[in-house]
Structures are given as C-alpha cells and as structure tokens.
Amino acid sequence: RSPSRGLGDVYKRQDLRIIAEANGVESARDVRVLISDVNEDPSGFSLSSNSVPEDSSSGTTVGKFRSFDPEGGALSYTLEPANSANHNQHFSINGDELILASSLSNGSYVVHARVTDDAGKYQIQRFLIEATNLDRPPANISLSNLSLAENQPAGTLVGILSATDPDGDEVRFSLPDAPVLIYENIAFKIEGDRLLSVAPMDHEPKDPLDVLIRATDST
C-alpha cells in the first residue's frame, strides 16, 4: 500500500530484487521502494557584479542575484536587517536586482542577502560590494591676485594659483595653447603654483588681460 501523499509531494519508484541464500538454496523477492522528494535549500547564491563607481546615484543597479532551486520553484530575494555587521541601509532589492538606496563613497560595503524558495527554504549569503574610485578632474581654479602694476619687470609675481581636487590628488598648473586673439597666455609663465609675467606690461593697449589656466591632477 502506497503511503499517503501530501500536497506537493513527489515520489520516485525504484524496483529492487532481494536475493537470500542459505545452504545453497536461494530465494528472491521483488520489492518496490518509493523515494519521496525532500525540499532542499536554494544553492549557488551569487551576484553578477560586485562593484559600482563611487558617487553613483540612488537607484543605480549593482548587479543581479543568481541562485538555483533543486525543485525548480520560484525564488525571491530580500536583504537581512541592517546592523553593525553590514551596510544594508545603503542598498535595496528590486526583483532580482541589488540597487543603491544611497550614493556611496569610495570603499568596501558588506551586504547580507537572503534567497528563499516557494517552500520557505532559504540561504543567506555575504557579499562584498566595492565602490570604485572615480577619477574626477580638479575644480575651482583661482588666482590669489588679479591685478599687476604696469611696467613691472619680467618675472614679477602676479599671484598664487590654487584648485581643489575631489580625490585629494596633487594638482599641477600649466598654460595651454590658446587663441591669441582671446587669451594673453604668451605674456605669462607658470612656475609651480606661481603665475609670473614674462615682460613688462603697458596698461594702455588692453585692460584686462584674459589668461587660460589648465589644472591637471597627478593621476
């Protein structure tokens, strides 16, 4: 008599023959074994990508979760509660996608995620997400002084150049080639962060003088 089958139970039939021997006499009996399916945990829980550029906006997709259910059931993905062992507060899940809930600074972030099958079996996995450095150009170029008395000798200090680099890199200054009808770069030179004149200047021909400055970071 077959055992009662519950909802969703799956049985595989296996026919066996049992042979017994005693004093040279064999006896055989055929039996049928019913092997019931036991729901197993999802396996192979992974993420398609574990990096995202720093300062990416909220809603940016980090990667897609992947997992395998031995029974072929539907899988769902959730985040474990945020705590001191993870950074789950910076992430959310949309379907099978891990997405940013907030912008990330350069660094490493731990995510604890759960995959659950339709029978309630689950697996929890730790993922390490890297917010990769995004090399950003220098900004806010400024000159400490914007005036110079006429007829000063060549090499007179005009002012000190400065700029900010979002990544904290060293900044170098130079005078790029520029249209002479717009910029007066040929009248100046740069030494380090110092803007210097290359010849005495006369006030009358043109006032003011426009100078194009290039700031380059060390990367």
Image (cartoon, rainbow, N blue to C red):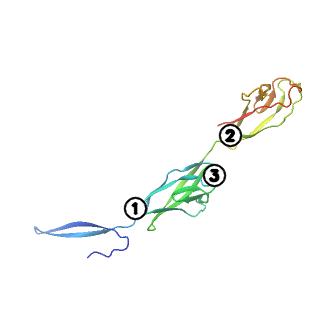
Q: Position of residue 72 (x, y in %)?
A: 40, 61
| Mark 2, other Cα within 10 Å: few <14 / some 14–19 / many ≥20 | some
Residue drawn at x 75%, y 39% is: 163
Q: Position of residue 142 (x, y in %)?
A: 78, 38
| Mark 1, other Cα within 10 Å: few <14 / some 14–19 / many ≥20 | few
Specify the label residue 158 is tagged with: none
Q: Quadrant of residue 138?
A: top right
Q: Earlier in the sequence, mark 3 or mark 1?
A: 3
Specify the label residue 57 is tagged with: 3
| Mark 3, other Cα within 10 Å: few <14 / some 14–19 / many ≥20 | some
Say whether residue 174 is left or right of residue 66. right
Q: Earlier in the sequence, mark 3 or mark 2?
A: 3
Query: Three-letter amino acid code at disc 2?
Result: Pro
Quarter of the picture holding the C terminus:
top right
Specify the label residue 137 is tagged with: 2
Number of on-image labels? 3
